Amino acid sequence: MAGDRDDIDALVARLQASDAAVRMDAAERLCRAGPAAVAAAVALARACADTDDQVREWSAAALEELGPPPDHPIRGWPAWPARPSTGAAEPRPIPRR
């Protein structure tokens, strides 16, 4: 099972493979790594938009295995701008088609 930082980094790289089976295997292994895969959170979130159903499902499952997000920012995750009046996060508009 993946858990070592080098293993996690290699699996994150495999999430970018052109072969869907390779991407799915990487997402599944990251899921099975559990909280040790926290460094892959951003890549897994992006993989939730993959063209392959199984890659999306394993990526979402992997994010669920990570548990709740930390109180501190995740490296590579975009920061939400704060509202000046309330300090609450500003929601992003949903694009209309």
Image (spheres, rainbow, N blue to C red):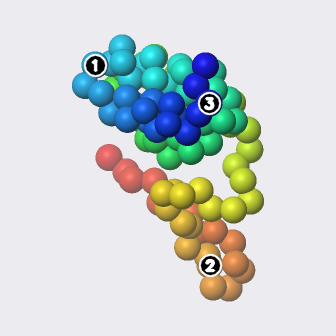
Residue 7 image point, x, y percent: 51, 31
- Give the spatial CA distance, label 2 vs label 1: 42 Å
Q: Residue furthest top?
A: 21
Q: Name the residue: 70% across, 78% down.
A: 87
Q: Amino acid at mark 3?
A: Gly
Image quadrant where residue 74 sits: bottom right
The residue tagged 3 is 3
Q: Nearer the viewer, residue 29 or 61?
A: 29
- In what element is the residue under mark 3? loop
Disc on res. 56? none
Q: Is residue 92 visible?
A: no
- Give the spatial CA distance, label 2 vs label 3: 38 Å
Q: Nearer the viewer, residue 38 or 91?
A: 38
Sequence-wise, the earlier of marks 2 and 3 is 3
Sequence-wise, the earlier of marks 1 and 3 is 3
Residue 17 image point, x, y percent: 30, 27
Q: Amino acid at mark 2?
A: Arg
- In what element is the residue under mark 1? loop
Of marks 1 and 3, the one in the foreground: 3
The residue tagged 2 is 83
Residue 82 image point, x, y percent: 61, 76
Q: Is residue 80 above or below residue 96?
A: below
Image quadrant where residue 84 sits: bottom right
* Badge 3 density bin: few <14, some 14–19, many ≥20, Cα 10 Å: some
Sequence-wise, the earlier of marks 2 and 1 is 1
Disc on res. 19? 1
Of marks 2 and 3, the one in the foreground: 3
Q: Residue furthest left?
A: 18
Quarter of the image with the N terminus is top right
Of marks 2 and 1, the one in the foreground: 1
